[in-house]
Amino acid sequence: MYATDFEFEGEKLSDYGMIICNFDGAGGIETVSSGADITFNQIKPCGSYNFNIFSSVYDSAYTTVFQICKNPCSAGIYDDLFLSVTDVSSLQRWLCRKNMYGKFKIFQEGYEDLYWNAAFSTKQIELNGSVVGLELTLYTDSPFAYMDEIIIKKDSDEFSFDIFDMSDEEGYIYPDVKITLLEDGKDIMEDGEIKYKKAFVLKNSMDNKITIIQNCRSGEVIEINGKNHIIFSQTHDLARDFNYFFPKIINNYTENKNTFTCNLKCEIVFSYSPVRKTGL
């Protein structure tokens, strides 16, 4: 890490007169996690000398340790470099919050559009009985970082549109989606009979599952919280009318273009944060 300041839940470390530091004075080369710590499980077939990969997992979320101290450029005298009980209390009230992750951003070149969902624990660093800094352990909710949220809005004239998944990790993300319908749903026929009544249909070329919502009306606003798998409409009880296939944004190593098509005129907004495999 080559940075002196960070932001957590809208407040900066520099707001507290503090900077990121290193008390042991070590410099030069170091090895740190880069958000790609994958554990491979291998098995050797009988009679073979070669090992095959039969599964791979991220065993833990990203974590790292760093230290903070008072900014010496702002300290008037030597004693000003020590942290008072009030200083420590204020910092820990800001950083150490139970049962929640907060948005953490580091101010370093190349990291401007990245963040982690983070929580902290702290230890005091003391010199001759006085507190000179804090050691912070950063815990996150995933093995990697995220790009700042991308918002993609498509208007009513586009029945087909493309979204390119910018994630480093192959797989899929459940985005947040807001759909404002501009016409009533349409009946979907199968074998000469109505299978879905007044339906809104959303397809993704990268997915074999289709999102279907029945009994839709013009003017209705449908909101989907992808991460928590929640769907909501103020004018429509969706419990029986939704097929519970939440839209995905998908990528694999050779393809990241998701072509979405829908069967109704609507305004649709996708919001998602692509994955970035990087560390501090």
Image (cartoon, helix red, strand yellow):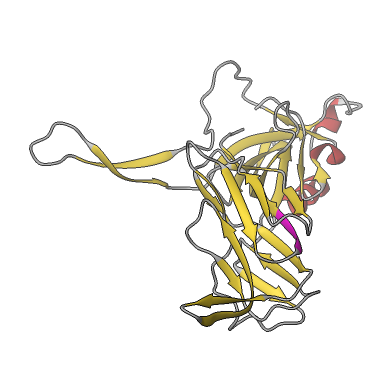
Magenta part of the chain? 266-270
Q: Which quarter shows the N terminus?
A: top right
Left or right for 225, reference 41: right
Q: Please tell me how many numbered marks the rendered image carries.
A: 0
Magenta region, mostly helix, strand or loop?
strand
In which quarter of the view is residue 21 placed?
top right
Residue nearest the viewer, comparing 110 with 172: 172
| Vertical comparison of 61 with 97: above or below | above
Residue drawn at point x = 65 percent, y = 46 percent: 163
Left or right for 251, reference 220: left
Residue drawn at point x = 66 percent, y = 55 percent: 101
Q: Which quarter shows the C terminus?
A: top right
Residue 269 is one of the magenta-drawn residues: yes
**Name of the residue lying farthest toward the top:** 28
Residue nearest the viewer, comparing 229 with 219: 219
| Vertical comparison of 224 with 131: above or below | below
**Name of the residue lying farthest toward the right:** 76
Q: Position of residue 188 (x, y in %)?
A: 57, 75
In which quarter of the view is residue 130 placed?
top right
Left or right for 48, reference 75: left
In which quarter of the view is residue 128 placed?
top right
Residue 71 is one of the magenta-drawn residues: no
Left or right for 107, reference 147: right
Q: Position of residue 70 (x, y in %)?
A: 80, 33
**Name of the residue lying farthest toward the front:** 192
| Vertical comparison of 66 with 29: above or below | below
